Image (cartoon, grey):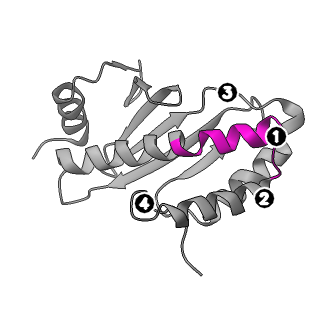
Amino acid sequence: MKTVTESLVEFLEANDLNYTALPGQSAFHLCIHTENADYGCVAVVLEREQEVVVYSVCPVRVPQEKRAIVAEFITRLNYGMRLGSFDMDFDDGEIRCRSALGVRGNGLTEPLLAHLFRANIRTMDRLLPNLLAVIYGRRIPQKEIEWIKTETDQHEENTPSRFSRN
């Protein structure tokens, strides 16, 4: 059976994804281009645990004076998320969307990796406008979450919901 790293590299190459191995780490950096933005993306391999963690990095850093309100927004956002979550570094304002996949004993397949990357990047890209609305002061966190839930419910057939139903 292939290692997790071998499977990931095979996936990246088969999908013509340009990547750079990060020196001294079991991690790979990619640049992802979407409808809303260009994202730095990092795939970290935890070989012993047989896990892959994918991070897409928000192209905007949160100014220090906005970090508390953005922290509230991503906390409220994470509470209803099914796949992945958002993290913010309070020291530098970096926000990442994090998704992980454990494959112990099952092997890592192309469809699993495709789903992992797609779910992560779609989540960041779909929620980036909402995040920016909070960063730039157009909406307060609780109202923005209500708006996301309403929009998700209205487009449920076409957009996988990231929120659980009450």
Q: Are marks 2 and 1 in contact (CB under 8 Å)?
A: no
| Three-letter amino acid code at the position of disc 3 | Val
Q: Are marks 3 and 4 in contact (CB under 8 Å)?
A: no
- Residue 88 percent location from the top left of the image: 68, 41
**Foreground disc of the pair 2, 3:** 2
- Residue 72 percent location from the top left of the image: 78, 54
Of all residues, the one furthest to the left in this rendering is: 1
Q: Secondary structure at mark 4?
A: loop
Q: Residue at x 20, y 34 (%)?
A: 11
Instruction: Residue under label 3, please give it.
Output: 60
Disc number for residue 67: 1
| Three-letter amino acid code at the position of disc 4 | Pro
Instruction: Residue under label 4, please give it.
Output: 160
Q: Secondary structure at mark 2?
A: helix
Q: Which callout, 1 or 3, points at the residue further toward the start of the chain?
A: 3
Quadrant showing the C terminus: bottom right
Q: Are marks 2 and 4 in contact (CB under 8 Å)?
A: no
